[in-house]
Amino acid sequence: MAATGRGGRRPTITEQARRSQFIEVTIELVARRGSAGASLSQIAEAAGVSKAAVLYHFPTKNAVVEAAYESVIHALVEHVEAAVAAHEGASAVEAYIRSLVAYLRARPDHARMLIAGIIGRGDGPGEASSQSRWQPVAAFVDAAKTAGTYRAQVDSRATAVIVNGAIDGIVAQGLDDPDFDTAHAADELVKMLNEALR
């Protein structure tokens, strides 16, 4: 995650490992207590080090929380891209839905970190993060329209926004109720899309 260490040099393996530890600890703290409940002192205590050790790697609490958020985003995107890589069009939409829901179900701390990160950053409709979420899905929908799998009249952007909103709802329900079958809900979403868009 860090391109440079102290003084602009490449970080050592030990420094990289320590940064990763602080990031993991921060993800756990933010997931349990929210961003406001994860102070530098609490991060240091959870990692079993001094506050000065955290400050050696991150200049502020916001810097370590931002690094944790970016780490979660990177891991999620990498997972979903790998799951979608072998698919095109409607099949890619289905793989996107199932892989995203499964990933966040298996990593509730990551899901909670994403929620806290989005709220803390003020990202919302119309901002860059929102656009970066719907555009890839809209591209899959466009490909499905071109292939003739989805009807030509389907609004790609609206569909992408609806898909992401439904995924958010499924993930939130899964966090609230551990017995909720998120995989089944993802399958139901795929089924609804196929019935509505073909």
Image (tube, rainbow, N blue to C red):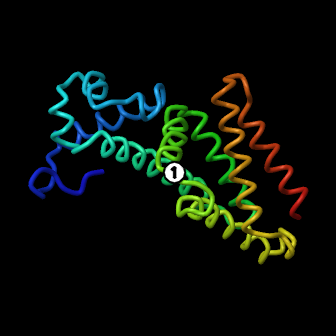
- For the point 19% across and 29% down, which residue is it? 51
Q: Quadrant of residue 180?
A: top right
Left or right position of 152 against 98: right
Residue situated in front as seen by the camera: 142 or 162: 162
- Image quadrant occupied by the C terminus: bottom right
Residue on which disc 1 sits: 122
Using the image, determine if residue 43 lies above or below residue 121: above
In the depicted structure, whether residue 119 falls above or below residue 149: above
Q: Is residue 22 left or right of residue 15?
A: right
Q: Is residue 135 above or below residue 172?
A: below
Q: Secondary structure at mark 1?
A: loop
Q: Amino acid at mark 1?
A: Gly
**Coordinates of residue 156 in the picture (x, y in percent):** 75, 69
Position of residue 46 in the picture relative to residue 78 (left or right): left
- Going 37% across and 30% down the picture, which residue do you hit? 38
Quick one: 122 or 76, which is closer to the camera?
122
Q: Quadrant of residue 19?
A: top left
Q: Residue at x 63, y 58 (%)?
A: 125
Residue depicted at x 22% and y 36%: 18
